[in-house]
Image (tube, grey):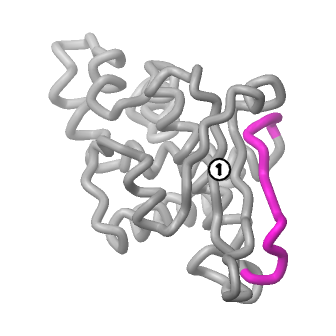
Amino acid sequence: MDREMRATINELAQDVIDIFHIEVPIASMEDIVRKMGGDIVEDDSVGMYSDGYIEKVPQKDQGKCSFKIVIPSSQPPNRKNFTIAHELGHLFLHMGFMIDESLWNANCNQSFNRKGDSEIEWQANEFAAALLMPKDQYKEALDRHTEGEQVSVSKIAEYFHVSADAASCRGKWLGYLEW
């Protein structure tokens, strides 16, 4: 993914935060999905195939689409947060939710799985990281949890309700941490 695409995705994530009045750190991804009109379904059989998926579903008697995100209940809370945010990345970036009405309503049976390492999966990961750990808030958390040369990535992760790996990768992509 090139720098321009990364910047566009980060701007989109910030727009979503602003439009839906999302407070960072995000306490409940489930509440955000409901605010957007979607549902979260926990189904442990999904874990055999992927970390989760998003699916457009037809709204009864309205001829329009809604969506649901399916995740395994066995995922740890921090992993669920990232999975849900990742699926929201597909919602906006690849399904056209609130961005392209004709794309959004064109195929109410479309779905994306959180699996693999294709370009669209990297884009959804970038969206998830930008939604859960916006650049400015990440820098503030980094400053609070750095003593001398020592950065406590685990405390940054705890603050944003994500895994240490997610917090570390975000810091590296933002240029705050070394690869």
The quadrant in which residue 153 appears is top left
> Residue 76 at x, y = what percent?
50, 21
- SS class of the residue under badge 1? helix
Is residue 113 a member of the stretch shown in magenta? Answer: yes
Please report the residue visible at 44 percent of the width from the left and 19 percent of the height from the top. Answer: 164
> Residue 71 at x, y = what percent?
63, 37
Which residue type does callout 1 highlight?
A: Ala
**Horizontal relation, residue 107 to residue 164: left or right:** right
Q: Which residue is mark 1?
A: 124
Please report the residue visible at 16 percent of the width from the left and 14 percent of the height from the top. Answer: 147
The quadrant in which residue 138 appears is top left
Q: Which residues are magenta?
A: 105-117
**Horizontal relation, residue 33 to residue 18: left or right:** right
Instruction: State how many labels appear.
Output: 1
**Horizontal relation, residue 1 to residue 22: left or right:** right
Is residue 71 a member of the stretch shown in magenta? Answer: no
